[in-house]
Image (cartoon, coloured by chain):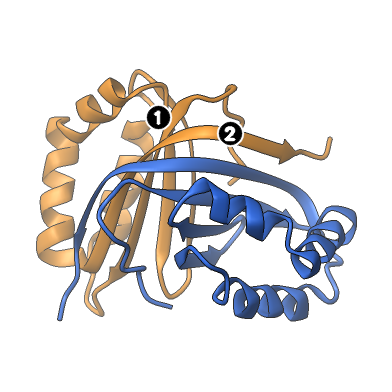
Chain colours: A blue, B orange
């Protein structure tokens, strides 16, 4: 996992934070498939992810239309249903416009 | 660490992603102090943090002015300098306007 190389702002970010249930059997498989699938979506710019007590996944997008299209993807909707009903104890989704960005990448 | 309970959008988010150097001695102490200090800042709404290969810290703010004030806090500036010069192999800071949010919190 690397820090995403994103274009100059403005672009969009989806901040997804979650806490898993103690029994989240099947989560890794569904999660891995979503990582695979999201990278094929038009307008997808990159993502970063880490989990300790809470899991944080930030995905970056060209525009809001791309986010809407991904949220209504059939296979993704099934994964969202499993997330709500089985995997997540709690979660939060925040749709954001990235207005400014700074980075320092070593070579 | 809980998922932050934030007000209705719009508000702001700072997405800070980083990779630590192999020698990042002193990082935990500085990082812990910043967690303490940030919570005392006016306009601060909450934060979420997790680190695996990359570290992701998202802090939430009332407005841009609060973010600017925190970024110029004297003790925080010294921590930023240590981060750049010693702790971080690479990092990225993204300033975002949260436009929409959904959450499901179990009780």
How far apart are labels 2 and 1 at the CA level?
Answer: 24 Å
Label 2 Cα neighbours within 10 Å, binned few <14 / some 14-19 / many ≥20: some
> Does residue B5 show up?
yes
Q: Mark 1, chain letter?
A: B
Quadrant in the picture for residue B78: top left
In this view, B58 is above or below B26: above
The count of marks equals 2
- Dividing the picture into quadrants, the one containing residue B64 is top left
Regarding residue B2, the answer to whether it shows in the image is no
Q: Residue at image x 48%, y 34%?
A: B98
Name the residue tied to disc 2.
B100
Work out which residue is located at the far top of the displayed protein and give it: B42
Residue B28 picture quarter? bottom left
Residue placed most toward the observer, B31 or B77: B77
Q: Is residue A52 left or right of residue B78?
A: right
Residue A20's spot in the image, x, y percent? 75, 59
Depicted A38 relative to depicted A92: above or below: below
In the structure shown, which secondary structural element does the residue marked by tag 1 occupy? loop
Chain under disc 2: B
Q: Position of residue A55 (x, y in %)?
A: 60, 59
Residue A98: % across, % down: 37, 44
Residue count near mark 1 (Cα–Cα under 10 Å), binned few <14, some 14–19, many ≥20: some
Q: Residue at x 34, y 33 (%)?
A: B38
> Which residue matches tag 1?
B39
Pick whichever of labels 2 and 1 is earlier in the sequence.
1
**For the residues carrying marks 2 and 1, which lies nearer the camera in this image?**
2
Mark 2 touches mark 1? (CB < 8 Å): no
Marks 2, 1 in one chain: yes
In the structure shown, which secondary structural element does the residue marked by tag 2 occupy?
strand
Q: Residue A39: x percent and y percent? A: 54, 75
Return the mark for residue B72: none
């Amino acid at each position: 996992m690397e820090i995403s190389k994103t274009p100059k702002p403005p672009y969009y970010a989806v901040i997804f934070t979650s806490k898993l249930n103690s029994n989240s059997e099947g989560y890794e498989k569904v999660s891995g498939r979503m990582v695979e699938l999201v990278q094929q979506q038009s307008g997808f710019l990159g993502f970063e992810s880490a989990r300790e007590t809470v899991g944080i996944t930030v995905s970056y997008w060209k525009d809001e239309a791309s986010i809407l299209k991904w949220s209504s993807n059939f296979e993704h909707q099934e994964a969202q249903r499993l997330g709500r009903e089985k995997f997540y104890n709690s979660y939060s989704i925040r749709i954001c416009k990235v207005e400014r960005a700074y980075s320092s990448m070593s070579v």
